[in-house]
Image (cartoon, rainbow, N blue to C red):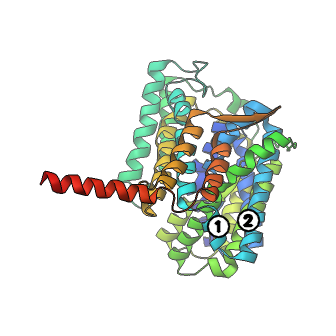
């Protein structure tokens, strides 16, 4: 019974982030709960239930899902997301054969850093629009400007407050706290319509949507798997440090990566966002010392049960846009900072022309909306800059521009000495 309760509280920690992704992208939050439950159980099967970690909705796919839904519709987008899961499995196979060093050579920090920054900064306009009560594209005013600003400010400030000043469990649930406070404010301002909740039954089947395969959507989504694949390595290292076990060796990174891929394919098959390992849950594991992977089995089962509670799904669907917008401002900014920190932590020298070119081109292509197309096929956003960053890293010589920089440095030293 204790393990059941521990599993339920782990879901409480992950809940806010888990449902945020489907609410932003137009997918069903009840299906996302189902996808997280099924995905975690499959991950445990592939990894022989050795890693105490929970899988749920990945933030890295928010922008691509939004674009995919607008361009090709939900079923085709889900087909693309399943293809992204296949990429994980392929990477896992290569890691099994070639070792983990392959990932670092193909996706060094100079490639991953700017791609992660694009994921965050590319969504900045949508975050601001929603915080002001508009639709993500800014075309429709859904909530009055002044009211929306109050609601989004409350959501943002509570999320920031919990992130910085929260102690114990409260520090682990900033997104949940932000959603709850913003929702309460929305009720006070009278912008919540409870009709769907009244009409919903207590028990109902989630609104499953099954994928269709569109080559444009598939080719668009495949490169998006780059950033979360690298993030997965960091998450496995983090949980290894927390528990004192080396999961890169046992069960092995190839198994955890394959488990993530299988979980993503299963989630997308039913209409849920792709899965990724949740760092919030890793923090909860560290806080509670709950190292037994069986606890995560109960977390997954709890998610599956809640997926069939119709009233819960209806309540989640009534959350107003400004609540999401306030949290998104912090969330997407934080994602961009993670990309920047990737460059700083790994001491990527941007004085080297080679590194400067890769980062600069990737950022401008991603944020500026560059698109390359052949016929009906078009590549843009995170997918385009991921491919461009990888190609530039493989093509540009390692020592490009170094002599030029040395000459400049010597000239500057000469000027300084002369001035002295």
Residue for point 66% across, 81% down: 250
- Where is 289 relative to 387, above or below? below
Q: Nearer the viewer, residue 349 or 220?
A: 349
Q: Are marks 1 and 2 in contact (CB under 8 Å)?
A: yes
Label 2 neighbourhood size at 10 Å, few (<14), some (14-19), many (20+)? many
**Secondary-structure class at tag 1:** helix
Label 1 Cα crowd, 10 Å radius (few <14 / some 14-19 / many 20+): some
Q: Which of the two residues, 256 or 411, is positioned nearer the viewer here?
A: 411
Which residue in the protein does label 2 denote?
Answer: 91
Visible residue check, residue 396: yes
Percent of width and height locating residue 71: 76, 31
Locate the N terminus by quadrant: bottom right
Q: What residue would you read off at disc 1? A: 103
Side of 37 relative to 318 (left or right):
right
Q: How far across and how far down the image is residue 78, in percent?
A: 79, 44
Q: CA distance from mark 1 to mark 2?
A: 8 Å
Q: Quadrant of residue 305?
A: bottom right
Residue 176 can be seen in this image? no
Image side of residue 114 versus residue 248, left or right: left
Measured as percent of width and height from the top left, residue 353 is found at: 47, 52
Q: Percent position (x, y) of residue 166? A: 38, 54
Q: Quadrant of residue 143?
A: top right
- Residue lying at 17% horizontally and 57% vertically, measured from the top left: 417
């Amino acid at each position: 019974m204790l393990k059941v309760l521990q599993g339920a509280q782990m879901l409480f920690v992950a809940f806010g982030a888990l449902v945020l992704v489907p609410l932003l992208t137009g997918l069903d939050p009840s299906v996302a709960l189902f996808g997280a439950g099924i995905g975690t159980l499959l991950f445990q099967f592939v990894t022989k239930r050795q890693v105490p970690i929970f899988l749920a909705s990945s933030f890295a796919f928010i922008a691509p899902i939004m674009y995919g839904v607008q361009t090709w519709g939900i079923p085709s987008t889900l087909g693309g997301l399943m293809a992204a899961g296949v990429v994980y499995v392929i990477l896992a196979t290569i890691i099994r054969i070639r070792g983990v060093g392959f990932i670092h050579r193909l996706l060094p920090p100079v490639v991953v850093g700017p791609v992660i920054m694009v994921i965050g900064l590319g969504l900045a306009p949508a975050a601001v629009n929603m915080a002001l009560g508009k639709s993500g594209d800014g075309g429709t005013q859904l909530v009055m400007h002044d009211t929306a600003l109050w609601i989004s400010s409350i959501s943002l400030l509570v999320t920031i407050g919990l992130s910085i000043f929260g102690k114990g469990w409260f520090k682990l649930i900033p997104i949940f706290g932000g959603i709850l406070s913003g929702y309460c404010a929305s009720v006070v301002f009278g912008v919540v319509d409870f009709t769907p909740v009244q009409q919903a039954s207590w028990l109902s089947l989630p609104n499953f949507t099954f994928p269709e395969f569109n080559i444009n959507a598939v080719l668009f989504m495949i490169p998006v798997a780059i950033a979360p694949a690298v993030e997965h390595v960091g998450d496995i290292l983090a949980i290894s440090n927390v528990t004192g076990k080396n999961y890169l060796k046992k069960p092995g990174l190839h198994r955890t990566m394959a488990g993530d891929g299988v979980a993503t394919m299963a989630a997308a098959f039913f209409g849920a966002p792709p899965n990724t390992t949740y760092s919030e849950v890793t923090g909860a594991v560290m806080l509670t010392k709950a190292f037994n992977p069986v606890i995560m089995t109960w977390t997954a089962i709890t998610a599956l049960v809640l997926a069939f509670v119709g009233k819960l799904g209806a309540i989640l669907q009534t959350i107003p846009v400004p609540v999401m917008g306030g949290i998104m401002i912090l969330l997407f900014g934080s994602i961009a900072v993670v990309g920047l920190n990737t460059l700083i932590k790994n001491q990527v020298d941007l004085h080297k022309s080679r590194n400067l070119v890769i980062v600069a081109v990737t950022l401008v292509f991603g944020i500026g909306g560059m698109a390359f197309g052949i016929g009906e096929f078009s590549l843009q956003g995170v997918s385009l800059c991921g491919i461009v960053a990888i190609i530039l890293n493989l093509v540009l010589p390692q020592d490009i521009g170094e002599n030029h920089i040395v000459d400049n440095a010597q000239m500057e030293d000469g000027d300084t000495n002369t001035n002295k």
